[in-house]
């Protein structure tokens, strides 16, 4: 294929194919968008695929009561600080170290435990998903990421692709486009 025949769409398809080869499921954003038959979120301002997160947390933490699992999901999806940096640090800690929860045992005593969001020891137990053209709308700002990487319903990476044949499509422009995603205050519940 000549460089002049390469399009951003072809680059996106190549990226999706490569990720599928690594074991990711591939879905197209418009198919799972709010209001669609296969919708995975109720609103465009939500970025976590909560159904997938709920399924994964239950699968990875079989001995923990449902109420404690819901508490963990609330902790991971509701930002605790107005600071994006502080929220990112807290999210990273929960992702790497587990989410601390408490629940009442049958004998009435209180138990403390960790809820795992990702199984790092057995990666095959996780739900690996990539979604292209994932649209997020907050207020009057509409953002559409080329590719979003989800693990267990949590968006962990955004990939912004550019047409390699377009001399105007620079890494700096892709970076600046990614920066516009951080300016949108997103609901993650």
Image (cartoon, grey):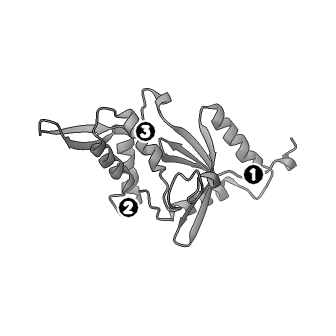
Q: Position of residue 48 (x, y in %)?
A: 47, 52
Residue 144 visible, this orientation: yes
Taking 78 as reference, is 144 left or right?
right
Q: Secondary structure at mark 3?
A: helix
Residue matched to label 2: 83
Distance of label 2 from label 3 (alpha carbons): 28 Å
Name the spot of residue 24 as percent of width and height, x first: 59, 36
- Front tag of 3 and 1: 3
Q: Residue furthest top?
A: 122
Which of pointers 2 and 1 lies earlier in the amino acid sequence? 1
- Viewer-side label of 2, 1: 1
Q: Is residue 113 above or below residue 48?
A: above
The answer for how far apart the CA atoms under marks 2 and 1 are is: 34 Å
Q: Earlier in the sequence, mark 3 or mark 1?
A: 1
Q: Position of residue 31 (x, y in %)?
A: 63, 52
Q: Which mark is residue 56?
A: 3
Residue placed furthest toward the front: 37
Q: Which residue does the numbered mark 1 point to in the structure image?
A: 8
In the depicted structure, whether residue 141 falls above or below residue 115: below
Determine whether the residue tagged by mark 2 lies in a helix, strand or loop. Answer: loop
């Amino acid at each position: 294929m000549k460089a002049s025949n390469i399009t951003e769409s072809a680059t996106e398809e190549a990226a999706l194919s490569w990720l599928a080869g690594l074991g990711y499921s591939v879905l197209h954003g418009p198919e799972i968008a709010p209001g669609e038959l296969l919708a995975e979120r109720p609103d465009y301002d939500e970025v976590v695929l909560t159904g997938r997160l709920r399924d994964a947390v239950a699968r990875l933490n079989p001995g923990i009561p449902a109420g404690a699992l819901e508490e963990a999901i609330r902790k991971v999806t509701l930002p605790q600080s107005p600071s994006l940096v502080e929220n990112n640090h807290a999210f990273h800690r929960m992702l790497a170290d587990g989410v601390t929860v408490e629940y009442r045992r049958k004998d009435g005593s209180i138990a403390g435990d960790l809820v795992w969001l990702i199984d790092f020891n057995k990666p095959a137990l996780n739900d690996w998903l990539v979604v292209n053209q994932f649209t997020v709308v907050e207020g009057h700002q509409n953002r559409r990421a080329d590719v979003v990487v989800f693990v267990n319903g949590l968006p962990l990476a955004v990939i912004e692709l550019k047409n390699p044949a377009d001399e105007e499509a620079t890494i700096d422009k892709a970076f600046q486009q990614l920066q516009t995603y951080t300016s949108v205050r997103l609901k993650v519940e």
